[in-house]
Structures are given as structure tokens and as C-alpha cells.
Image (cartoon, coloured by chain):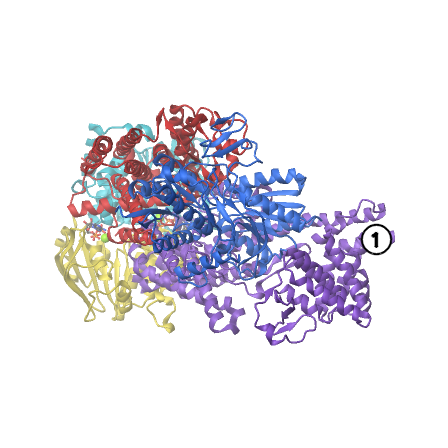
Chain colours: A red, B purple, C yellow, D blue, E cyan
Amino acid sequence: MSRYRLIDGAGLIFLAIVLALAVLVPASNLWLAPDSALHIPDYLVPLLGKYLAFALLALALDLVWGYCGILSLGHGAFFALGGYAMGMYLMRQIGSRGVYGNLVLPDFMVFLNWQELPWFWLGFDHFWFACLVAIAVPGLLAFGFGWLAFRSRVTGVYLSIITQAMTFALMLAFFRNDMGFGGNNGLTDFKEIVGYPLQWAETRAALFAATAVALALGYLLARWVVTSKLGKVVVAVRDAESRTRFIGYRVENYKLVVFTLSAMIAGVAGALYVPQVGIINPSEFAPANSIEAVIWVAVGGRGTLVGAALGAVIVNAGKTWFTGALPSLWLFALGGLFVATTLLIPKGVVGAVTDILGIRRKSELPAAPGVVAPKTAPAEPAQ
Amino acid sequence: MVAPPMLSGLVRLIAFAAFCAALVAGPACADAIDDALSGFTTDKYDDTDKALQGLVATAAPNGLAVIEALAAGRLLFDPESKTVLYKDASGALKLAKTGEPAPAELAGKPLKTVRVNNRLRRAVDAAGGAFELRSPDAAKRAAAARAVFKTRESTALPAIDHALADEKDAAAKKALEQARAAIILGKADAPEAERAAAAATVASVADPDALAALRTLPADTPVSVKAAAEKGVAAIERWATVANVIQNLVYGMSLGSVLLLAAIGLAITFGVMGVINMAHGEMVMIGAYATFLTQSLIGAYLPALNSASLVIAIPVAFLVAGAVGALIERTVIRFLYGRPLETLLATWGVSLILQQAVRSVFGPSNRTVQTPEWLQGSIEILGVSLTWNRIAIILFALAVFFALQLLLRRTSLGLQVRAVTQNRRMAGSMGIRTPRVDAMTFGLGSGVAGIAGVALSQIDNVSPNLGQNYIIDSFLVVVFGGVGNLWGTLVGALSIGVANKLLEPFAGAVLGKIILLIAIILFIQKKPRGLFALKGRAVEA
Amino acid sequence: MLKVDDISLHYGSARALKGVSVEANAGEVTCVLGRNGVGKTSLLRAIAGHRPISGGSISFGGRSLQGLRPYDRASLGIAYVPQGREIFPLLTVRENLETGFAPLKRAERTIPDEIFELFPVLKSMLHRRGGDLSGGQQQQLAIGRALVTRPKLLVLDEPTEGIQPSIIKDIGRAIRYLRSKGTMAIVLVEQYFDFAQELADRFIVMERGEVVESGDAKALQGDNVRQRLAF
Amino acid sequence: ADDTIKVGILHSLSGTMAISESTLKDAMLMLIDEQNKKGGVLGKKLEPVVVDPASNWPLFAEKARELIAQNKVAVVFGCWTSVSRKSVLPVFKELNSVLFYPVQYEGEESERNVFYTGAAPNQQAIPAVDYLMKEEGVKRWVLAGTDYVYPRTTNKILEAYLKEKGVAAEDIMINYTPFGHSDWQTIVSDIKKFGSEGKKTAVVSTINGDANVPFYKELGNQGVKATDIPVIAFSVGEEELAGIDTAPLVGHLAAWNYFMSVDTPENKDFIAKWQTFTKNPKRVTNDPMEAHYIGFNMWVKAVEKAGSTDPDKVIDALPGTEQANLTGGVSKMLPNHHITKPVLIGEIRDDGQFDVVEKTPDLVPGDAWSDFLPGSKDLEADWVTLKCGNYNTKTKKCGGGA
Amino acid sequence: MTIGGEVTSALLYLDDVSVTFDGFRALNRLSLSIGANEMRAIIGPNGAGKTTMMDVITGKTRPNTGTALFQARHDLTRLDEASISQLGIGRKFQTPTVFDMHTVEDNILLALKTDRRPFPVLFSKRTREEKERIDALLERVRLTASRHRSAGELSHGQKQWLEIGMLLAQEPKLLLVDEPAAGMTDQETADTADLLREIAKTASVVVVEHDMVFVRDLGVKVTCLHEGSVLAEGSLDAVSANERVIEVYLGR
Ligand SMILES: Nc1ncnc2c1ncn2[C@@H]1O[C@H](COP(=O)(O)OP(=O)(O)OP(=O)(O)O)[C@@H](O)[C@H]1O
Ligand SMILES: Nc1ncnc2c1ncn2[C@@H]1O[C@H](COP(=O)(O)OP(=O)(O)OP(=O)(O)O)[C@@H](O)[C@H]1O
Ligand SMILES: NC(N)=O
Ligand SMILES: [Mg+2]
Ligand SMILES: [Mg+2]
């Protein structure tokens, strides 16, 4: 029977690693002596946390791209919106410790002469409200956007490009000081989260652990969706959209469900990212960021979930390393990595590993072929 | 425009100079020249200004040469002996006072340049203008008259009247009359009727200067003159609203043609071939750098061809970018046919590599590409001003578009390209050499992107980031127009350009762009396959 | 003319052809018969160069086709009418036909009138996009397109699929006519037994990727071939 | 190792800011090299640690952390955009390290761990406007900028200042454009129209980065000459002009605290070293490079004075440190962590250099909190006596406003 | 043909339907009605409009004019593909289209008649009945051996069968079958005819075929379309004796 298991071999390994990290990284950072070989230094904790937040974003993207065939070039927008929601909460937590010492208004508002807190900032002094917004706003945007686009049957590159236009428009909007989100400088100089100073190693460790747990949960949720029958319908949509309609599935609703869910996961990723990197600003909306996220997924292996997360970590760790070790040549290294990945391991890292290990992928979900070819230049029919 | 006080003084002196020159230059004048010249040697703007006025006042025979030298930064002085000298256009060192070659002992000394600032530059222009009203060249006389029209300095009236009396050339005469009218209009002691008539003449010029002249009449101006001026203003403004719309349309076309140029190569590599070509922008950049190199090489080795360097750069950029494109196709893209999404990943990598390569070779900062003489400046038609380079880009973009359209529709290569991209394997079985066609097509798209780089080097930064600025817009244009349809790209580019420029005056550049993006998103809901969507079974299959 | 000798072909690790041999001569029609999924199309793909073979050899006119790309084979004179038609959807009917000019000399680049005589519907639809045609019209176009290249070997994969009876008869006549010219070899995959029987000079029957029966036209009359085709 | 002192260099070498920041990395390498030739600091050699934050703001914070925590640098020279500085601020505070920031900025900041060697608004914008009023008789103003914090703030300050000087609201036109804006047709033509209403008009440009080249090209093409409508820019220096055909721009202005063309022995020496170091006899210098020059030398002096690279000691030693700048004066680090600088106005020459047309007679002390913004009028920064970056002189409290 | 009685009794009722593509009339005032449990064979020259007619019925193509009613109350010209399918109209395409990346078994599973809304689908569990039904269907289309293969790997004829299986899985009230015998051996063709006759006992079937042996096998009323309208209708013998049909379709 081809009922797919919720957790397959790779998934089990993945979950084990992520959950182990959730425990070991904080433990090693907080309790091992600094000169121990296994000690994880302070600076590494938020860095690893950032990778995991990106991994969660990649996971969200793989859900829509790998399984539903929606190549979103605007997922960074959902991530950034989640980040802004968290940033607004953190901003409010600064209280009167800002440079102008204004209890209510964030510094940039004082400085631009705002007299009172705009309505859309209300409520952000509550952590749970911010968390809710971090999920709800990306979800609502995705729902509204998807409702329009999927109903009108915007597909393929057309959809990709308008998602890109969406994030680009948001970027320009958030750049504007008038928007009330701190303009180009964005939100930064955070002090504490739910009462714990962000500078404490314990807080950082806790944030890391939370991110790891969120990644594990995100994986389970995504996996549950794709192994359900809905997952099969969605893959059917990816491979033969109109055929799916002819057997009675309302394709737009399926896409909408997955797209919205994915956006909410991306929002969570953004909300976890911000306290760990300490700044959120409009460049997170930059189309290039969204494209990069797509690339993480491709590097890791599209349509595998585990691969997406892995790709995000690999590329970002590579970036961290290259920018320090080869500051003026690292683009060659990174660019070369992308080209090499495509040519040498077309199925991504996970695909390559499974191929090498000769793991039979019978129980695996259908592999993903290319699907976003412009319709006028059809991909070659599968041989 | 109310001229600063020292300027009006200067022009008054010019009038006097004309008078002084008419007399036989006496010793009084000669002393005055020495006096005047000494002002150039203090390295203070105020003194330089006075010196300039003095020079004009004395109508020194060599005055024009000195003023020209001052304007060009060739007026020098010896800080020790306070002698003023200048280099003529050929570089020969001459004495300012007499125009005789400078004594050898001065030539070896550390001479200082007489510095000018904007105020002096204006004064120099005006002084030069006074001399030029008498130039043998009719075009120069007209230009000088137009300069007076701008300043409306009443003291220039005698000179204008004088020039008008002898003027034969129709254009120059008209310009002189307009200049005269501009002065009369503001002249409190001129007859009322004449001033009112002058208002009409000024209004007929219908440009910003005319508007300024009509608007800035003093409070004590007679009612009839004011009324005439107001009528003129109203007429100009009425036209201005129309002109504004036309202007914005033209600007929109111009922006659109830039978008078209940037996008059209992508319309081939992406639209026709289906490669999600993130390195497209870098092909544009390579074209721009090819232009820079061509210009530098020509400047260094074939200066005679300098003014044609941009034209020569077109085939060079095409070949260089095309070759790079073909190379990328042969080494990377060809392994990815049938896997279009992976082209996104690979070309993104290629784009990073190319950016860094250019940064490593040419450095991170901007490179200068000169605008040839014949592309500089603008023409003003009835209040609508068009710059030459924009006109050139519009025409160039259209030319590239139609050439490409012809190539794809009318040649066998075009047919083969389309066949290959629609079904590579079957095209092979029809005897089409698919690898060659693939390389040529990708090379063609890249080459066209390179050509766009030539044009963009004229209006934007030539830097390693050049391409990044166009990639999003290019994809937007191609998709908005309808993938795979060149006409769609044309219409898409122009309509986005025009819409942008019509929005900008109301919403500002930032909000305008946001509105435009949202409008495009909504538009795609109406036309999910772009403006020029292909219809029918062929597409849905 | 065409000599397929003991070839094997794989899809991934699955073997679709095992030691298949077949010959086709000028002026003859060679029919390939067999049930669904036995490897007929795979054999033709190997001949056309759409799939690499993993063993054995194919030669044409005495020349090995090893390593030759589809376009090389086309210029040697092999034309292919694939199953599923594979016309160029966005090219017009005329352009679809003109893609066949590629291996021809400049002077030969015309569409032979006999194509329009055979398929008059193509003439009336020259400007319609190939993808918009009905299934049967596309099939006619695919055959017409192959003939434009003036092939020496014509490889047809179920050419009658989806075609109306009168035109099937025309195609039969056309194949007979082409055979009668004596210069062209024809390989025909056909499920429609009567049609095959009428045309075949020689035949092979395949089963599970192997040739299980072969012979000349007379041998086809017997019942054992029909039996092979039943399940 | 312990025998070297590590110096962090945090400038983008790729991405949009590479165009400006790469030069500063090279300048720092040269300064460090020079210092090592002189024997280093405290008898130890200096060792540069270069990383690439790639014009990515969160990456700036990450790289700052890497430099301080992992590479253990004693000091960091870096950042260009304000957002990058804002992004690294918490890191410097948390890990208690020292940052030298070399670029003109919007002010409204004074942090214990940061030393601002670029201009505050009062060291650039206000003197520039004064010059235009006095020397060019400008009555109408176009404030054109890129839409982000620095231009917005600068323009706010200028607007308040101009109004105080009696300029009517309708004589001020404010225009913002996005980063990288490249189509200036409409805006330049609007400026032309705005300038044709009979009053002398000038443009004060806070347009940043890439957008400048197309802006100036459009000015040139539409024939907006400096003699008609001069443009004074705060973000265009020699490096930016190196990419533009300057012939049509002659006479347009820029306000900085340094120009390459300034004729002093120090500057000559600096330029010569720079061109030798970069092996390019045409390489230009610019204002932020001078800022790094001043900042670096001040740091060296402070370290020697403190006898240690310990951040707390260096931070205490820096205020009051003096260093001859390259334009013939001596800059001093003020208690508010800004420095004194001369303000220079230059006109663009056709060789891409500036002709200095005005120089303030005295050095202007950098003001962290603008006197023209209501929120910050009463704030004062003083890390020496008050130990506070935002002391409210009204409420007498550290920690800002009401 | 606009008798009220026919409208109400017919399962499918097309009247005066025209479709034009850029001026070309693919359907020209076509009228047709199919009764409950009726099987109808449609023949006609290539390009007569047979497939286009199916496109109209299934909501793929919107007619320029005309009426298309299902069960006398559903206006097919206003519904989208999914709704029409949910009404009980199933279709097999002329070129077989299956879900290439899914296994053969999953192709059937997705087609099974169940709630099609996303959330019920998300939470659905496969029941024993479903499993048995899938087994039976696979057996019927002789693909049991291939049940775990990806559908994309099937040969052309196997895909035809899979698509027939999917059609059956939907348990439609009306089956539109476009050239089911294409690419099948003679015996398979006969088997298909058997299958269709069996189905027609409980549902209505519209079959398009060019294979006259097959059509004869079906033994049902035949409609011959030509240039978008009905040219002849009746028993196969009657229709194939029609001079015009011979001229434009059968040939001599
Ligand atoms: N692209 C492919 N990938 C994997 N397996 C394939 C592929 N194409 C065909 N096969 C398998 O190879 C075998 C032979 O297929 P082939 O298409 O040659 O059969 P055929 O004889 O042409 O059948 P039909 O009469 O149905 O067209 C079949 O089992 C088929 O499932
Ligand atoms: N989108 C379209 N644009 C132009 N013509 C079209 C389009 N769709 C169909 N046609 C034309 O409409 C006619 C009817 O096509 P249809 O596919 O319905 O024929 P058919 O009866 O199914 O033929 P066949 O037996 O060959 O499958 C054909 O002539 C076809 O070329
Ligand atoms: N500080 C600046 N120029 O952003
Ligand atoms: Mg076959
Ligand atoms: Mg049909």
C-alpha cells in the first residue's frame, strides 16, 4: 500500500538531529567550560539559531514549491512580516530605555516628530498578541493574495513574478518613513523579550531551543500535510493541474490552503529570526532574499522537506564561512557552489545522498520535476 | 529672474564698454586695464568679479580672449610679479594685457589659475554675451540674445538696439526682438502700450524664462501691462497643462524604451527558450563594460573615432555579451533543458560569479562612459523638452526590437529557434542541429542584452551592480507582456513606462512605483497570461 | 538498409528491449507488432536516436548510427513520426512543415505537393497553429512533416491512431506508393492488424521487449500472430 | 596570537554598497600598513581582519559579532549606511567594543562604544545652505533625497532652519526617490519648472549611492547648468564622480569636510601614499577616507595613552585626543564622541575634482542632537563628565526626553 | 429540437451550441441529447468538433452561443470543470493524461468518488472499501502488476487503460470517452467495448471513435458530426450507408 509514513527514515534522522540540537547546543553553551573542545561559544548560538530560522522558511517554501508547484519568489515577504510583528513587540519592550526616553513612542517616531502611537502599533506590548500577528498577518496576506491569484488561475511564472512584485512593493512601502515602521533603519536595538534581556546567554540559548523545536514541529506539520491524501492531490495539481480539475478537485482551494499554511510557517520563522539577529528592516523584503530562499531549497533538494532545511543551513553556513575566510572572493565560491550543485547533483544534496546510499525511494513521495517552464516553451515530455 | 546686484552693474558697464570702444582707446583706458587686471591676482572671488567688470568697462582689445580664458580656467597669474597671463586655445602662454607671447622667464614660474565660482561663471557668460552680440556668427548672436532674454537686464538695451539695427538673419532678429521685448516689459519708463505689446511678444516664447519674465513684474506696473502679462501667463499655462501631459507621455515612452531594451534580451532567453535567466542583468552589465572598454581603447589609440565610439561599441557589446552567453549555454545551461527551474539556481550562481569577476577586474566603483557630443543636450518644442539621448534610446530600442522581430519571424534561424524551444527532441529528429541553435539563441539573447548595456551606459551607473537594477523590471515586463510574445514585451514595456510617468507627478516616485506594482498584480488577475496572452489549445495542452 | 542488431535499451534500471534485431530494406514495409508496453515505441526511439541503446548496434546504409544525434540521423535520411504526434504546438502548420527543411539543400526547400494531395486538410489550415488542430489533423501533420525531409527511411509509430477511416485508407495508399518508388524503407508500428497485414512485406512481433515471431507477409496470415497479440 | 593587535574592518565588499565601501577597506589596510612600518602600537604589530558583510544589514551584526567574539579584535572600523550602524550597535554595546564610523549621517545618536568621525548635520548641511544663501543668493530650495532616514532627517533639519531664515513654505520643494532610482526625467523637469518662477533656486541633494549618476546625467542632458540651478550634494565625492562624465556638471557643488584637491602637505603626502599603496596613480581619495585617517590615528594615540587596547580604557582616553586632519587643521574628539571638522564647499571641476570655494574659518564641533528637531533640542551627549549619550538638560536626567 | 419533454428526460442536452476560434467555427449550432443510461457513439471526420463538444460539456471551452444542460437543471456553460465533474460527468481525454509522478494506484485513489473539499481530504483516511475498490479497478484494467509504478513510465496503451480506470473510479453518471481504442490491439479494443457496454447499464456513455469495428461492437445509436453539426444519426448501418458520410468520413 502506498500510504506514506508520516516519519520516514530521513525524517527520523532529521528530527533526531534537530531535537538533539535543541538540547545540546544550549547545554554546551551554558554548562560546558569555555575551554572545553565541545563548548559552543556565545556568538555561535544566535548564528545557529538564524540558520534554523532560515531552515524553517525553506521548509515553508518547499511545501508550496516542491509539492504544490507554486514557485513563490515572494516568500521573504511573509518571513519579514512575521519578523516585523516580533520586532514591534521587542520595540515596545524597550520602553523608556530608548535614546529619547519616551515611554510610549519608539525612538524613530520621536525623531520624526510623531505625537502618538499609530493604531497599528497598538497591542504590540503583549507578547502573545505579537505572536498571533506574526502568524495571522502573513496568513491573511497569503490568503488574500492567493484567493485573487488562484481563482484567476494565475500560474507558473506569472504567479512567480507577481509574488515578486508583491514583496518588492512591500519593500518600497516599508522603506518609507511615513509607513511608521522605522523606514530604512527598521527596528533594532532591542532590549528584552518576555522580561529576559536578549543579551543573556540563557535567553539566547532558549531562543535557539525554541527555534529548533519550531523547526521540528514545522517539519511534522508539513510532513503530515504532504503524506495525507491532500498531499497527493497537491502533487497532482503540480504535475497536471487541469487534469485535477477534471476529476473534480477545486484546485484553487487546495493551493490556497497550502499557500496560506506555508506563509504562516514563514511568519513564525521570521518571528524567531528577529530576536536572534537583532534587527528587522525593509531589505528583508528584497526580492533577492526570496530568490535566495528558493535556492536553498534547490540546493538541498526540492520536494523533500528535509533537503530544504538542510539546504538553508548549508548555504548560510557557507556564506558565513566564505564572507569571513574569502572576503573578496566569496561570491565565486558561492556562485560556483550553485552551478556545481545544479550540474552535479540535480536532485539536491538529499537526492544525492539517497542515490549514493542506494536507498530505495519506494516509500518516498514523488520526486519533483521542473514545472514552471513558461507555458509557451513546454518542458520536454518526460521520456 | 532678478539678477544679483553685481550682475546688473556689470551689464551697465558692458553698455559703457561699447561706448568706450567706440572712442579711440586713450591712455586713461590703458591704465584702467592694468587696474582691472590686478584684481585677478588676489585669489578672491570678489576681486576677480571686480576685475572682470573693469575689463569689460575698459573694453580692452584683448578682453574677449581674457574672458574666454577665465571661463575655461586658462587664465593664470604669477603670484610674485602679479602678472596676469593666459593660455590660448592652442596652449600658448600670452600676456593678458596685450595678447603678446609671454616672456620666457614667466613661463617657468609656478603660475596659479584664476579660480571661478558659479557667480563668476554667470558674470563671465554675461560679459561674453555682450561681446557676442556683435559676433560675426548669426547663431552666436541669437544665443547671446537668448541669454539677454533670460536676464532681462535693461542696460543691455542699447546693445540690443544697436545689434537689431544691423541684423539680417531672421532667426537672430527674432531672438533679438524677443530679448528686447523682455527688457521693455519690465522697464518702468517705457511707454505703457509698448510694454503691453512686449508682454505678448514675450508670451509667444512660451518657455519657463518667458513665464518668469511675465510673472515677476514689480508691483507698480501699470494695470494694462499687468493685464497683458497675466493674459500671457494664462496662455502659457493653458498650454503648459497640455504640454505637461505630452511631456509625461514622452517621458513614459522614454522610460518604457529603456525597459524594453533591458527586457528584450530576456524575452529571448526566458520568453522563447524558457531559461529563467537570472544572469540576464549581468549580460547587460557586460555590454556596458564593453562600451567602456571600447571607448577607452578608441580614446587611447584611435582618437579620431572618438565621436563614433558609442556606435562602434554596439557590435562590440553584442559580440562580447553574445560570446559570454553562448559560453554559458554550452557549459551550463545545456545540461538543464527540461529542468527549467534549475536554470534559476545555476544562472543565479553564474550571475554572482560574473558580478564578482567584473568587480575583481574593473574594481567596485563606477566607470565613466562619455556621452558623445551629438547625444548631449536637448531640444525644446513648444515647452516640451526632449533630451537627445532619450530620443536616441527610443529610436534605438525600436530598431533593436524590429530587427529582432524580423530575425525571429522571417529567417530560418528564427523558425528553428522556436521549434527547438517547443520540442527539442523532435526538432532534432527534423534535422535541426539543436546544440547549435541553442547556443546561438542564448548568445543572441545575451548579445541583445549587451546592446542594451550600451544604451544604459548612457543613463546609468556602469558598475558591477548595473544588472541587478534591471533584472526585476525585466522579468516584470516580459511576464506582463505575455511570455513568448515579443510584441507583448514591446507593449508591456511602453505601457509600464507611460503608466509610471503618469503616476509620478501625483504620487511621487516611490508611491508611484508601489501603485504600479499593485496595479500589475491586479492586472495579471484579469489576464493571467499577460497582456498578449497566447490562446487556444496549443497553450493549454 | 536499416539493420538493428541485438539491441538492448533501458529506462533507468528497467530493461525495455532485450536483444532485438530487425531489418528494413528499401522498397519494403517492415511492420512491428505487439501488445501494449512490449517495447515497440522503445525500438523506434532507439532507431531515431531519442534514447541511447545499452547494447547491440544499429546501422543504416552500412553506416553505424552509434553516437549519432537525432539531427545527424535526420540528415542521413531517417524521418520519424512519433507516437503522440509531437507537433510543434505554437508553430503554424506551414512552419511545422518547414522545420523539415533543415537537413535539405537550399534548392530542395519546398513542401512537396504530394503531401497536400494526401492530406488536403493541411493545405486549408496552413496558418493555424499546430497545437490548435484536432488530434487526427495533428497526426496527418506529423506524417506530412516527416515526408518534407525526403527520407530514405520512414519510421512510423501507430500512424493511424485517431485518424478517420477514409484517411487511413489514403495513408495506406500513400505508404504503398512510397514503397513502390523503391527507394524508401518503411518501418511501421501498428496495432490495427488488418491495416498492418495489408501493407507488411515483413514483420516482427514483440513480447516483453523481445522479438518472438518474425517473417514475411505470408507468415502474417496465420493465426499464431493474432494469438500473440491477444492477452 | 598575542604579539599582534587585531583591527576589524567591516565594510561591504559586495552588493550595492561595495561601490563605496571597498575603498574604505583598502584605506584601512593602508593605514594599518603604515602604522606597522612605524613599529605598530604598544610595540605590537597591527593585524587587519577583513570580513564582507555584503551590503546585508543583519549580516553586519553577525559579522561584527564574529569580529569581536571570535577574532577578538581590539577595535572595528566600519559601516557606511546608517542602517548598518544601527544594526551593529547592540553588538558593540553588548560585547563592549569600539567602532569608528566614518560617514556623514543624520545625527541623533551618541553611543559610548561608537566614535563618529563623519559629519553630523551641523557639520555639512547647515553650512552648505548658508553658503548658497550668501554666495548665490538662493531664495528657493529643492530638497531632493533618497527615501530613507538620513535624507529625511537632514531635510527636516534643513526645513526648520530655512523657515527660521524666513523662507516661505511654497519656496521649498521636497522630493524623495527610492534607492537606485534611475529615471530622473520627471523630477529634473519639475526642478527646472520650480526654478523658473523668478527666484534663484538651488537643489540640496541628499540622494545617495547609485541614484546619483543617472541624476547628474539627466541634469546634464536637460541642460540644468550650475549657473542656473546649482545642486549641492552631501553624498557625492571624488569616488562617485569618478564614474561620471563631469564636463556638463562643472560648477555644481558638494559640501564635505575634506576634498582631495585641498592643497596641504599632509594631504599631498596622504594622496601619494594612497596611490602608491593601490598602485594606481589615478586613484582618488575622499571624505570618509579622511575620516578613517583621523579616527585611526586618534585610536592609535588613545591606545598609547591608555597603554592598553582595553575598550574601557580606550573609550575613556579618546575624548580630547587631537589629530591633525588633512585640510590643515587639528580635529579633536569631543566628549559626545563626534569630532571637530572644517566644513568645505567645493565646486565640481571638469576633471572630477572639486574646487574649494569656501571653507569655514574654524573647525565646527559635531553636534549629536540637532537643535532644529523638537525631540532633541534639549538633549546633550557627554561621555566624559555626564557619562551619558542623551542627557536631557531640562529634566536633568540621562535617558532622553520627557 | 426544443421539445420540453426532451429537455427534462435527457441527461445531457445540448442545443444550438456554437464555438468559434478566431473566426473558425468548430461547433456550428450543434444540438444533441443523451438519455439516461444511453450509450451513444460519435463519429465524424478529423476536425469535425467531437473533442470540442466534450470540451464544452466539461467546462473547458465556453460556447459562444447555445444551451448545455445536465439533468435538465445544471447549466454547464456556467460551471467550472471541478463542479461539472462533481455533478457526475467524467471524461477520458483523447491523448491520455494521467498523473505522471504518482503511482498507478494513487492515480486511481485520487479519482475515487469521495468528498473533494480540501479539509475533508486532508483528514481523510483510506477505508477498506476504498482499498477493495482500487484493487478491483486495477484488476479490471489489467494494471495490477504495475500498481506501484509511476504512471509516467507506462506505455501509451497502458496509460489509456489507466485513464479508463480513473474514469470508472469516479463513478460518473455520464462518461465522455474520447477515442478509447486508439493504440490498443484488436482484442483490447473488443474488451473496451465490453467494458463500456457493461457501464452503460448504469450510466450514460458518449464514445468518440474512428474504429468502425469497435463502433459496430458497441451496437448503439451513432451520430456523425461534420463541420460542427450533426450530419447523420441512426444505427451504424444506416449512417454508414449515408452518401455524405461515406464521402467525408468513411471513404471508398
Ligand atoms: N520513459 C519511460 N520511463 C520508464 N519506463 C518506460 C518509459 N517509456 C516506456 N517505458 C516502459 O517500457 C516498456 C516498453 O514501452 P513502449 O513504450 O516501448 O511500449 P509499446 O510497445 O510502444 O506500447 P504501446 O503499444 O502501448 O505504445 C513499457 O513497460 C513501459 O512501461
Ligand atoms: N483553439 C483553437 N483554435 C483554432 N482552431 C481550433 C482550436 N481548437 C480546435 N480548433 C479546430 O476546431 C476543429 C474541431 O476540432 P476537434 O478537436 O473538436 O475535432 P475532432 O472532431 O475531435 O477531431 P479528431 O477526430 O481529429 O480528434 C478543428 O478543425 C480544429 O483545428
Ligand atoms: N549615513 C548615511 N549616509 O547613510
Ligand atoms: Mg508505443
Ligand atoms: Mg478529437
Q: Against D300, is B156 above or below?
A: below
Residue E120 x/y as whole percent? 31, 27
Residue A224 x/y as whole percent? 26, 32
| B269 or A152: nearer the viewer | B269
Q: Amino acid at mark 1?
A: Arg
Instruction: Confirm if mark 1 falls within 8 A of ligand 3.
Output: no
Kindly indicate the quadrant of the structure image that contains residue B422: bottom left
| B71 or B282: nearer the viewer | B71
| E92 or A227: nearer the viewer | A227
Which SS class for mark 1?
Answer: helix
Q: Can I make out residue C124 in this image?
A: no
Position of residue B125 in the picture relative to residue B421 (left or right): right
Numbered disc total: 1
Q: Chain of mark 1?
A: B
Residue D106 x/y as whole percent? 51, 41
Identify the residue under disc 1.
B195
Residue A82 x/y as whole percent? 39, 33
Kindly indicate the quadrant of the structure image that contains residue E148: top left
